[in-house]
Image (tube, rainbow, N blue to C red):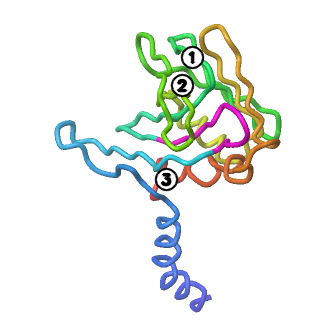
Amino acid sequence: MKNIIFFFIVLSPFILSAQKKDCKYEKNEIDEFEKILVKVTKEETVRKGIGYPVVRFALAKVGDNYAVIMFLSNGKPLCFTSDSELLLLKSNDEVVRLSFGQNGVECLNLVYVPGAGITQYTNQLKFLVSETDLISLQSDQIKKIRIVASGEIIEVDLTKGNTTKEAGMTYFIRNVKCVLGGG
């Protein structure tokens, strides 16, 4: 029994250190003015394939508030308002519904992509998420995303036609720990 406790004490720092290395941050600091912790993970592509949309996610924690930041590139314009939503369908068919977290209207901007010779509509959008929903997202893969904006519904299947299928489906499993705890 003493040997088990000794090994646990000796190995704990290495295990925790290895878990922290999995997290990659755009920002991980105490805000100079507000004196609160601000964590923003590096964005990661969850859906890329032939055609649109291209979806990348990052997670954010500001004080006690959490958000899913979606970087969206689409073939046509969309605008997001307070009634816009991001729905995440887990592999167990449970739906996690996130509300658009900004006041006013936020539209995708038309940009030219040099080298590709195309134009696309793109923007960074924040959706509020509760700690309970983050914990729920961490427990299962995501198989589909639904984006509701401008009176339109865009369905994104992460299991088909997705060159980043595994990374997309397991995004929350791998990244929630980075904003919830010690990552």
Residue under numbered circle 1: 77
Residue under numbered circle 3: 178
Instruction: In this rendered view, identify the residue nearer to me: 136 or 104.
Output: 104
Residue under numbered circle 2: 121
Residue type at mark 1: give it: Pro
Q: Is residue 176 above or below residue 6?
A: above
**Residue ranking furthest to the bottom:** 3
Is residue 183 in the magenta section? no
Residue type at mark 2: give it: Tyr
Residue type at mark 3: give it: Cys
Residue at (72, 47) in percent of width and height: 169
Mark 3 crowd level (few <14, some 14–19, many ≥20, 10 Å Cα): many
3D distance between C-alphas at marks 3 and 2: 29 Å
**Residue ranking furthest to the top:** 151
3D distance between C-alphas at marks 2 and 1: 6 Å
Q: Is residue 98 above or below residue 161?
A: above
Of callouts 3 and 2, which one flags the residue occurring earlier in the amino acid sequence? 2
Residue at (45, 49) in percent of width and height: 41
Q: Give the foreground label among 1 and 3.
A: 1
Q: Which residues are magenta?
A: 46-59
**Secondary structure found at label 3:** helix
Q: Is residue 65 left or right of residue 49?
A: left
Residue at (52, 44) in percent of width and height: 115
**Secondary structure found at label 2:** strand
Q: Tell me residue 15's x, y (percent).
A: 53, 74
Q: Are marks 2 and 1 in contact (CB under 8 Å)?
A: yes
Mark 1 crowd level (few <14, some 14–19, many ≥20, 10 Å Cα): some
Mark 2 crowd level (few <14, some 14–19, many ≥20, 10 Å Cα): some
Q: Tell me residue 18's x, y (percent).
A: 51, 72
Q: Is residue 101 left or right of residue 151?
A: left
